[in-house]
Amino acid sequence: MAMIDERHVEWRVVARLRELLDRQPEAEHDVTLTYSLFTAILCWTCQRMRDNGRSLPIWKELGRERAADQPWGVRDLHPDKLEAGTRDLDALTGSAFLVGLRNAMAHGDDRTVRPYHTGREGRPDRRLVGFVFDAEFYDPDKGRPRESPPTWGKWRLTLKKVDMRRIGLALADRFCNGFDSDARRDAERHVLVA
């Protein structure tokens, strides 16, 4: 029998969150459910990939990708520059993009995440369709310098349900696929999730 350790449990948790995000039914509260699953995946995987030596190659790979490319698609998120940075958003790396979103969500004391809703023609009611993130983008390998402006500036990004789903699934896949096949098989076989 395989020895099950903490990394097996972590893999199983993220795999389960991914499964829930992928298979969620269309429902009255599907946007808030998507947001909940997306933010859980975002916080868990970003922290683990940055801090865990086994995931370091994945994190370095994300640092070489452009956030403008899919699956991140930062240009599809209706970016609005709030504060100037020293680099253009087109040069934003995948890792800096994910950390900026994670920090906006996890450090929400500045009201950095707000609901995004639209009205329906001829009706007074509003429908929640996503969330708006005010995110600062720093080079995650250098950390946040205390007195310097964000490397890529501060941007307002609008993530609709489809965006949160696309990014969340891609991030969970990267995390889970970073484990070798034996570890994945052991986690699937021996770790139960509710």
Image (cartoon, rainbow, N blue to C red):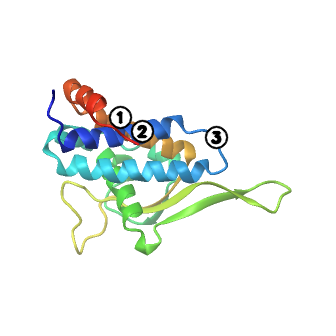
Residue at image point 52% right, 48% down: 34
Mark closer to the chain start, 2 or 3 = 2
Residue 18: give its label.
2
- In this figure, which residue is indicated by the disc labeled 1? 173
Quarter of the picture holding the N terminus: top left
Where residue 41 appears, as percent x and y from the top left, is: 38, 47
Q: Amino acid at mark 1?
A: Asp
Kind of element beneath mark 2: helix
Question: Marks 1 and 2: CB-CB under 8 Å?
Answer: yes
Residue 57 location, quadrant: top left
In the picture provided, is 6 more to the left or to the right than 22? left
Residue at image point 58% right, 50% down: 31
Distance from Cα at disc 2 to Cα at disc 3: 16 Å
- In this figure, which residue is indicated by the disc labeled 3? 26
Of discs 1 and 2, which sits in the foreground? 2
In the picture provided, is 13 more to the left or to the right than 21? left
Judge by depth and name the residue closer to the eye, 189 or 146.
Answer: 189
